[in-house]
Structures are given as C-alpha cells and as structure tokens.
Amino acid sequence: MEDSAAERLLPLDPRVRWLWWTTAVLGALPVVVVALLVDAFTGVPLPAGLLPGLVTVAAVAIAWGLPVLRFNRWRYALRADDLWLRRGVLWTTTSVIPYARLQFVDTKQGPLDRLFGLAQLVVYTAAVGTSGHLPGLSAHDAERLRERLADVEDDDLGI
Amino acid sequence: MASDAPQRTGERLHPAAIGVWAFNTLGPLLVILIAGGRDSPVVAAAAGVSLLVGVVRWLRFRWRVDGQALLIDQGLLQRQRRVIPFDRIQAVESVRKLRHRLFGVVELRIETVGGASTEGKLEALRPRDAEQLRRLLLRETPTTPPASQQVGEPAAVQPEQVVLARLGLDRLVIAGLTGGRVGVAAAIFGVGQDFFGDRLNDLLPRIDLSGDLRSILVLAALVLTGAFLLSIAATLLTYWNFTLTSDGVALRVRRGLLEQRADTIPLRRVQALHVEENLLRRPFGLAAVTVEVAGRSGGEEAQQSRYLLPLGTRAQALRLVEQVWGRDGLADIRLAPMPTRARDRRMLRAVGAVAAVTATGVVAQGWAGLLALALSAPAMVLALAAYRCLGHGRSGEMLVARSGVVVRRTSFVPRDRLQSLALRQSVFQRRRGLASLALQIARGRAARGDPRMIDLDERQASGLLETLTTAR
C-alpha cells in the first residue's frame, strides 16, 4: 500500500481559485451595478460616487479574499480506510467518510470547471444528502480518485 | 485547456429515448394545441426545442458496465459521470409506462440504499437488453436482497411476539396534554392573542379596565382549554390502543382509533433511537421514544409513525431502548458534561441577545425599553439549562449524545450504524477550543437532523473523529 504517501493532506488544484474568483466576480457585479444605480437615481445623503466606491472596494476585497481563504483551508486525504475532508472559512467542517460506507460516486464538470480544466467529485453514503463534495480537482485527479473509490471493499452494513 | 476530460465511451440509449422524453413535454403542449388552437407556431417552436433538447441529451448520454460497476455519463454543460458498484445495488426495476410502450422500449431504474430518488435511470432500452442488463446487475450482487426486505419470510414458524409497550387511556390523555401538540395549542393561543392583541392596545386606555380584562381572561382561558381538548382528541385518534411488539426480527406498531394502522420496522433498518423529553414532561419524569429508520420518506405520516413510545416514564423509555438494541446497561450510562467553556458561551450568547433586545427597545420606546433588562434572568436560566442538557457518553459500541433545552433529546447510536462523521467548528467555538461532532446516519428526511455531540472539547472531538469509524 502507498499509505504513508496517501495519508498526506492534499490541497485542491490551485486553479480552483480562478474558478472561485470568476464566480465571485459574477456574483459581485450585480451588487456593484445596483450601488451605481442607487447612487445615480436616488438621493443618498453621501457625496457622489462614495457609495459605489465603498461597495466596489468591499466587493473586490471579498471576491478576492474569500477564495484565497477557502483554498488555504481546503485539505483532503485518501487514507487507508476513509476519505478525509476539511473545508470552511468561518465554519470549519472536517469529515471522515469510510470507504466501506460509499454507495456511489459522481464526477461532475460544469462549463467553468471545463474552462479551468477542473472536475468535481461527489461521494454518497446512505446518509441523507451529499456526504462528501470535492470541488476543484484536476480532471485527471478526479478520474483517478473515482477509480480508486470504485474499488472499495464490500459494505459490512447491508441496511 | 480542458482536453483531459474523460473520453466518452459506452452504449447509447435506444433512440426512442428522444421520443420518451419529448412525450413528457409534448403531452401538455398537445392539450394547449387542441384547446387553444391559435398559438400553433409557438407550440410548434416549443415542440421543436423539446425535441432538440432530447436529441442533444441522447447524444450526450452513455452508459456502460465497467468491471463491477455501472457507469453513466450525461450532460452537455454540466457533465456528470456516476459510478454505481454492483454490490451497492438494492433493486433493479423495469418500468413500462405508456410512453415506453408507444416506442416498444423499457426503462430500467437502479436503486441503492438511501436517498429518495432513483440513483440510476436508463430511460429507454430494448426489452431484451434491459432484461440482460437487469440480470447482469443483480447476478453480480454477492448477497441476495438483504433480510430486511423479506421480513417474516418463512411463514411456517410464527415467531413469538413480545409486547414492548402498550398505552392506556390515562397515558394517552397525559400525552395529549404535554405533547408536541401543545405547541399547536400555543400557536392557536398566539393567533388569538395576535388577533385581539391589537384591539386590546386600542381599547385598553379608553375602556373601564375591570370588566374588559375579565372578559379577555375568560376568552384566553376558553381558547387555551379548547386547544388542549383538541390536542387530547388528536392524540387519542392517532395513538388509540398503541401497542409495540417485537419478534426479534422486526418491530410492530399498532395504533389508531378510526383508522387503524400497523407499521412493521425491521430491526436491521433501525439506525438510532431517541429518548425525547420536552419542557412539560421533564419535571414529571416522562419521556417519549422515537426511532430513526433508514430510507423512510418524510411527511406527517412518518412523523407520527416514528414513535415507539408516545409517552412513558423515563425508566420505561430507557428500558425500551435497551430492549430494541438488545443491550443491557444503557440506562446506566453516565453522560459526561461538556467543558464549562460551553456554558460560558451560552451565557455570553444570552447576555448578547438581551442587550440587543434592550438596545432596540430603547431606540424604539425610549427609556421604557430598559424594562427588557428584566429578561436577563430568564435568559440566563435558559442558557444554563441548555448547557445542562448537553451530554455525551459511550458504552462499548453504543454512542450517546444529548442536547436540546425545549425538547431534550438523548440519542442512542450504535457505532456500526455510523455512515460518516463530521466535526464542525465555528470561529467562536475555535476560540474556546470547542467543536461539535455530527453522527451521520442513514436517517429519514423528516428527522430533526443527525445526532450531535455539541461543544465537545476540541481535542476529544478530534480523537472521536479518528477512532469512531475505524474498523473494529
């Protein structure tokens, strides 16, 4: 087994920051536009341009900073018996998902994923909803992981 | 840049899939066409689009059997590849609805454990291929369908039914008086107050208080009494003649006055048991027992049938938990309190909430808003009570987690029922070195959420995270 190597905590593919930055900008644009409109067409008791300026600064800070923090926090590891995930900036969640509990595995690629050469891996157990979601793997890694997870041993539960 | 996407190989569905999909959208369109008759160009365009979507979907859909798993690739923009290992497949169902018959094809639905939806769908296959694939998928399953699906299989030996719980009339009345339905009663009372409250404010200053106040009190008493009576009646109807029996393989619940219901819960599908004690019941030492069953859908129905014991003494409840899990000594598990830092956190939260309310009050009502400070005492008491309700314990393979102040819930989860674990930590928890551990089980959708050990010591929580799921 390649345990010692496999137990290292791995970061996501760095390109995922570009994906998150892109979505953050797309999300922030309407806010900035609204701020501009409010400034132009309503009587805000502020000097002209101050409101959109502040909003833009805040939006840029969040849109730039959050993906960086998220990326720095994200770690995953394929361990001997389970998949280990840690994520979240304000609320940090660490999950341990035993391979023996996996029901099935999805790999997904949205348009933006493809633009940056990324893929997502989603694993499901019998628990409600999604059990583990790994965004921002390189397409190659996602495929490799999926194959490895598909080979897991038989379930000992049998609900 | 994205050239290393997985290459698509495998079989397509029968081209009739396009027709099958279109059939779904075309049905309503046809109705519009026949009924309206005028906007036919619009309808034609819509039909064209839906056909085009179908063609693209068909082109992008591939499935294949790869070793011991079924692979399904689909999607144009959002591409998805799903891998379902054979040994996870619980059932394969062939479906022939009208739309399939029209095109002479069969739909194959592949189901795994958990999840409300069908995990794999091949919506149009030639009947011969479908049959072949169905055999392939099921033959490869090492174990025949689990015992849970064929409970009470050989009718030859009728196993003995042991009565675990039975509820008399007196208990039912008390259950109605103190149950969750009182929440409904309180809501009705609240609506009454809302309705009359505004008028009350208008009237109070003007009218002679003595007479009016009395009528208000009488009204309130009437509403409250009515609500309680309703609650008792509803409880009687739902849980009349409640009997819980077990034959060692499955639990059987019988209940109901007008409509008699009988539920069978295979023991191996039981994922967790909760002992629930609400505020009204706790002082009297009364509790209810609810069950968490894998793969049960939500809704009110599930809400009602999750009770294994609508009301009993605490000792009865714990005894029932022991009997269902077949382990003794669960009642004696001493739950450990969470670190006192968890209490401080709750106190701080209470103080913050009161401060916020007071500030709003002062802004809105002037200095009279300071009266809100009187809330401090109950808020602190509640915070302290919430802390006291937290607890966690373990006895061999059984994990126990307790939380909740309004409804205190003590959950009993055997270690082998854990699907996964999640340790969650907010920024505030991190500062105090605390963390919450969610025991993720295969529960029904309607459930209150996974059992959680809230505000454990950080290091202890990580220790549990590492050790609980490792193989024994």
Image (cartoon, coloured by chain):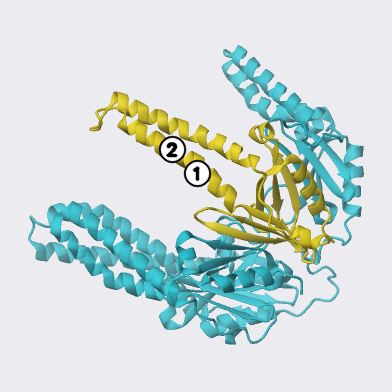
Chain colours: A yellow, B cyan
Quadrant in which the C terminus of chain B is drawn? bottom right
Q: Is residue B41 visible?
A: yes
Q: Is residue A31 left or right of residue A102?
A: left
Name the residue located 71 percent from the left edge and 22 percent from the top edge: B51
Q: Are there few (<14), some (14-19), or many (20+) residues within 10 Å of tag 2?
A: some
Name the residue located 88 percent from the left edge and 44 percent from the top edge: B65
Q: Is residue B191 left or right of residue B416?
A: left
Query: Is B81 drawn above or below residue B278 in the view shown?
Result: above
Residue B174 at what x, y percent from top left? 44, 76
Circle number at residue A59 = 2
Chain hosting mark 1 = A
Residue A133 at what x, y percent from top left? 65, 50
Q: Are there few (<14), some (14-19), or many (20+) residues within 10 Å of tag 1?
A: few
Q: Amino acid at mark 1?
A: Gly
Query: Is B16 drawn above or below residue B424 in the view shown?
Result: above
Circle number at residue A65 = 1
Q: Amino acid at mark 2?
A: Ala
Quadrant in which the N terminus of chain B is drawn? top right
Chain hosting mark 2 = A
Marks 1 & 2, CB-CB < 8 Å contact = no
- Secondary structure category for the residue under label 2: helix
| Label whose residue precedes the other's in the sequence (1 or 2) | 2
